[in-house]
Amino acid sequence: MARIIYGVAGEGFGHSSRSHLIGQRLIDAGHDVMFVGSKKSLVYLKQYFGEQVKEIFGLSFAYEDGRIDKSETLKRNLLNLPEGNRQNEELFRKYFEPFEPELVISDFEPFSAWWAWRNRVPFISIDHEHMLTLCKLEHRSKNWFARMTASVVTECHYVGAVAYIVINFFKTPLRVDSAILAPPIVRPIVRALEAGEGEHILLYSTTGKGEKKLRDILYKFGGQKFYVYGFDKSAEYKNCIFKERSTEGFLADLAGARGVIASAGFSLISECLYLKKKMLLLPVAGQYEQIINGHYIEKLGLGISSEKLDEGVLKRFLEELDKPMPSDERILWPDNDKFFGILQDVLNKLHKPISIALS
């Protein structure tokens, strides 16, 4: 049995759901796992692991009109950092040091990773974000500022990992020997779904704003039914059916959709790929990870990407839905078994190997 600390970034659903799945595998294999999270990850993980989850001060994003406000994000985090450092030092003294971990895993959570580096505890990085710095990518010059900002933030998150497992949906050359490319993993609840091709398109609004403008666009395609999430209301207007927040309802509608319209978050992309759904992606402005995701989804024939939704873009997407799903060898389709095989290979190379085999 190994003692493992698992640090999870507080922003974004993907970090939490992925760490839940991997952490449960470690526990099922007999290991003692302490989770640390902040904000969303803290709330999510406590549902499943209770007192095994401790609170760590975490970085956060500030949003303005659906896009990341970089100056406000920097200001907010700098102002909160002194108190955050005090909180974390107490966490390290009260929980980390007595626990004496043999391994730290970080899903883009910097403070647990820096603690491991300072205390010479081996740590592994498992996330999608390091794709931006550890993979050789195609970049468009017009997004240079967003690219630069994202690269600096990712580079500064932590250094010195034994291995960086970069979860991604496309093959691409790696920049360093310590990086390993791995396919996406999906939650058991998604793996249990039976994909079908219904008549509706699933649309998820990240901001829940601009309803009238959205309906005006969708009304122009009267023959197509749209199921709309993100406004947290139940209503029907012509060909638009608005639905309240519901994990089960959303996943059922995802499994039966013709296609999906959403921002370009990695978690939903992974689930769409697993269910073989084409996507119209609308990356959050200024969020370079999503911009790159959108670019490669379009490049690989898995859908299209656009800065905004309008009549022309939607028309192009509906035409795209008539084409078969691609079988490009560069696509890394979700594969939980393959991912855990890669993770086991990494764990086998530790000074003290750790097994995740299930008895």
Image (spheres, rainbow, N blue to C red):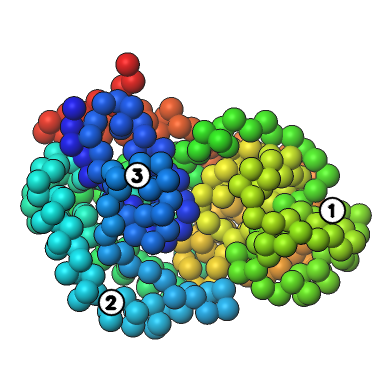
**Mark 3 or 1, which is nearer the eye?**
3
Q: Residues within 10 Å of mark 3 (few under 14, many from 20)?
A: few
Q: Is the residue 148 above or below the residue 294 in the image?
A: below
- Give SS at disc 2: helix
Residue at image mark 3: 50
Q: Is residue 146 left or right of residue 310?
A: left
In this view, the residue in front, 283 or 19, is: 19
Q: Residue at x 77, y 75 (%)?
A: 213
Contact? badges 2 and 1 (CB < 8 Å): no
Secondary element under disc 3, as helix, strand or loop, is helix
Residue 169 on image: x %, y %:
50, 45
Q: Nearer the viewer, residue 222 or 286?
A: 222
Residue 353 appears anywhere in the view: yes
Q: CA distance from mark 3 to mark 1?
A: 41 Å
Tell me if 338 is positioned left or right of 334 in this view. Answer: left
Q: Is residue 61 above or below residue 39?
A: below
Earlier along the polypeptide chain: callout 2 or callout 1? Answer: 2
Q: Type of residue at label 3? A: Gly
Q: Write down the residue under mark 2.
A: 80
State which mark lies toward you, 3 or 2.
Answer: 3
Q: x, y percentage for residue 46?
A: 38, 48
For the point 27% across and 52% down, the residue is 54
User: Is disc 1 surrounded by few (<14), some (14 to 19) or many (20+) residues within 10 Å?
Assistant: some
* Image position, residue 31 (x, y; %): 24, 31
Q: Which mark is residue 102?
A: none
Q: Which residue is mark 1?
A: 225
The residue under the point 53% across, 41% down is 331
In the foreground, 212 or 41:
41
